[in-house]
Structure formats: structure tokens, C-alpha cells
Amino acid sequence: MSTTPSGITILGSTGSIGLSTLDVIARHPDRFRVVALTANARAEELAEQCVRFRPRYAVMADADAAERLRRMLADRSPDTEVLAGHDALVRVAGLPEVDHVMAAIVGAAGLLPTLEAAKRGKRVLLANKEALVMSGALFMQAVRENGAGLLPVDSEHNAIFQCLPDNYTAGEPPRGVRRILLTASGGPFRTLPIRQLCSVTPEQACAHPNWDMGRKISVDSATMMNKGLEVIEAGWLFGLETGRIQVVLHPQSLVHSLVEYEDGSMLAQMGNPDMRIPISHALGWPERIASGAAGLDLLEHGMLQFETPDSARFPCLGLASAVMEAGGTAPAILNAANEVAVAAFLERQIPFTTIHRVIEDALERCAVQAADTLQVILDADEMAREAAAELIMQAKVVVAR
Ligand code: NAD
Ligand code: MG
């Protein structure tokens, strides 16, 4: 066991992954020292975390929220310096006293700080799949060139990583592997009659049968865009083309993914659907540390099911495979349009079934370019957001008529 605790920055500490990360870290005060915590606008929640974990820095993306946090911490955690804005997020991801960076901001907002962590050679614990989907080749290059560590936190990718040999290097096609299988629960609408999908509410979409997650990823699970993003994520993490990544529906969410080897052996990682398991695996790697999660009782469950996903019910899966084939800025366009469409659905501006249409139309409108600089990727993101917002305005006009 290490004698000096490792410094850690948690980007997005007030979210679902952030909270689970702090839960694991609190079990290992000898291993981890929290250097920085960050949040978007929830100052009260970040204040409580600061009082408990005493970070050197606390960052609020929002300046007004930072001012509120400063006042709350003046007496209660005076050694915590409160910073504001996006540049501060990037700064705390690259601090010299930080060894681990948990990338748990949701969406494109996490790209620059996560990339900074890679550029500074940190051990990046990646939950923020959107960052990798947007910037794939550039991100993997930053990891390689700066000797960064890259440990998948997404449960499926973490499962695959656990089923690969110990000396596996991120981004390289794993030796002797025929293909990987990503499991997917199918979300809350796996069996709902398709004609009812147009009238489902944000509350129904966010009520995931097995996992308790943030609202954006919950809607992504309901459309299965989450799995689409994960196919792209797996392509970059494991150096595999689309044809070697199969999506399998598995409603129980107990087998978190599988690797099939050339000899026909298939290795799977199993466990209860509790994100503290992949989080603690990534935090402790290569050692195993306690997560607080209960062991899996197979006898209680009895049965495991596997099915082929229905492409008519889940059109987002096909869109994601197509953009992975197209390459360049196509995944960034898909990701941005999806973020805008999901936010509009959550605000009740568009029906659930319009989400994939907005993405499809944005992909048609925005020209794909080679994603060889960060600026090209950020421009594609912005262009796709504008296109999606315009399409949503039009969709609202149609709904209002
Ligand atoms: P969440 O919505 O619960 O939390 C998001 C966090 O990001 C919060 O701390 C929030 O303050 C912060 N944030 C949001 N917008 C921001 C902005 N503009 N600037 C700075 N900070 C911002 O989300 P989550 O469910 O914890 O998911 C986080 C990431 O992890 C996502 O990329 C998701 O796909 C991925 N992930 C989550 C789970 C899960 O079980 N929740 C599983 C696998 C992967
Ligand atoms: Mg996942």
C-alpha cells in the first residue's frame, strides 16, 4: 500500500459519479487526498463536500455560485480557495500535486479539463464519455504522448478492461481478441409498445430500471444513444472498429460486458449494478480496494437474459454506428445535437421520438471534417448545437400548430 496519499481532483463532484467517487474515497483516507472538487452551480452541495473533504481548491463553473460558495466556506473551510469559471476547471485538472483526475462532468463541458489532465500526464479516470467521443484521436494521442494513464469508469468499458490481460495498453487492439460485447439494459422503454414512445415523459425516461444516474445519461439510456456513445468510446479505448463491437441487450444489468478471444473463450465481468465497483477498480488499479458495494447473489436472480436490440425502437444506435464509420467531426456533431435534443426533451419542448430526428437532421446539415485540431472539434460542436436548436424551434412550431 502506498505511504503518501495520492492527490485527486474530482471534476463534477456533485453529480451521480462524483458522489459515488467520494463515497469510495472516504473509505480510504490513507490512499487519497482530495485536492480539488468542482461543480456547475450547486454551491450548497459543494460547500458540504468541502467541509467534509477539505480540498485545497473548490471550483464553480458559475461565477455567482462561486461567490455564494466563498461566503459559505469563509468560516467552515477557510483553507479552501474558491475559483470560478471554465479556465479554473482546466487549471485544477492539471495541478502538479494531483495524480488522479476523475472526469465526471456530463457532456462536452468536460472536454477541456479532461484533455488537460491527459496532457499533464495524470491518471485519468474516465466517466465523461462525451469528451472521448468528441475528441477521440486527439485525446488518445495526448494520453500516449504524455504518458497519462487512462482507466475506464463506464461500467461496460471497465468490465472489458478487467477482462483484458494485465499489461494491456489503452488504445491498442488487444492481442488475441476476436470481438467485444457491450451489454445494455434497454432502459425503461425496452418493452413499451413503440406507438406509445411519442408520449413518454421526462420522469418516465429518467426512471431507469437498474441504475440511478444523472438525467442526461438516463435519457440517453432510454433512447440507447448511451450505448451508441459507448460503442464509439470502446472503439477509441480498445482500438477496435465497429464490426468488432457487438451490442447485446441484457435486462438484468449483472453482466457488465464481455470479451471474446480467438480460441472461443468468452470472459465476462459481473457484479451488482453499483457504480462504486468500476470507480473503485479505476481508483485502486492495479490493486483491488473496498468499494462498499454488496457482492452479487446469483441465486437471488436465477436467470440472465440476452437479446438483440430492436433497431426500429432504438434508431440512435444506428446513428452512432454510422458516425463512427464516418469518423472526423461526425461523432462531435452527433454528440452536440444529442445534448441539445435531450435538454429540450427534459424541458418538455419536444417529444421523446423527436430526439433522434433532431440528431439525424443536424448530421445532414453539418459538413464533416477531419478532426485533427481541437478548434475544428469545438467549431463542429458549436455548429451542431446551432443546427439542433434551430430544428427544435421548427419542431416546436409544428407541435404548437
Ligand atoms: P450528473 O448530471 O449527475 O453530474 C454531472 C456533474 O457535472 C455535476 O457535478 C455537475 O455540477 C457537473 N456539471 C454539469 N454541467 C457542467 C458544466 N457546464 N460545467 C462544469 N460542471 C458541470 O451526471 P452523472 O450521471 O454523474 O454523469 C457524469 C458523466 O459520467 C457523464 O458523462 C455520464 O455519461 C458518465 N457516466 C455516468 C454513469 C452513472 O451511473 N451516473 C455511468 C457511466 C458513465
Ligand atoms: Mg455505461
Image (cartoon, grey):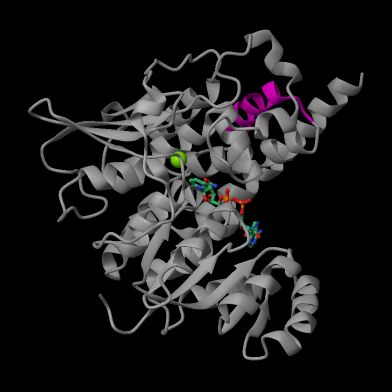
Question: Which residue extends farthest right?
Answer: 401
Residue 389 placement (x, y as % from top left):
74, 39
Measured from the top left, where is residue 379 in percent x and y? 58, 53
Asked whether 355 falls inside the magenta stretch, the response is yes
191 or 247, which is in the foreground?
191
Residue drawn 10% across the image and 37% down it = 176
Span highlighted in magenta in the image: 350-363
Q: Quadrant of the C terminus?
A: top right
Which residue is at the front of the view, 337 or 82?
A: 82
Q: Is residue 352 above or below residue 326?
A: above
Q: Can residue 353 be seen from the camera position used here? A: yes
Q: Residue at x 60, y 43 (%)?
A: 336
Most common SS among magenta residues: helix
In the depicted view, which residue is nearer to us: 289 or 269? 289
What residue lies at 58% left-to-right and 52% top-to-bottom? Answer: 16
Near-viewer residue (75 or 358): 75
Q: Residue at x 46, y 63 (%)?
A: 102
Q: Quadrant of ligand 2?
A: top left
Q: To which quarter of the image does residue 268 belong? A: top left
For residue 237, above or below residue 138: above
From what the image shows, is residue 86 above or below residue 72? Answer: above
Vertically, is 228 above or below 400?
A: below
The residue most toward the left is: 263
Residue 213 inside the magenta-drawn segment: no
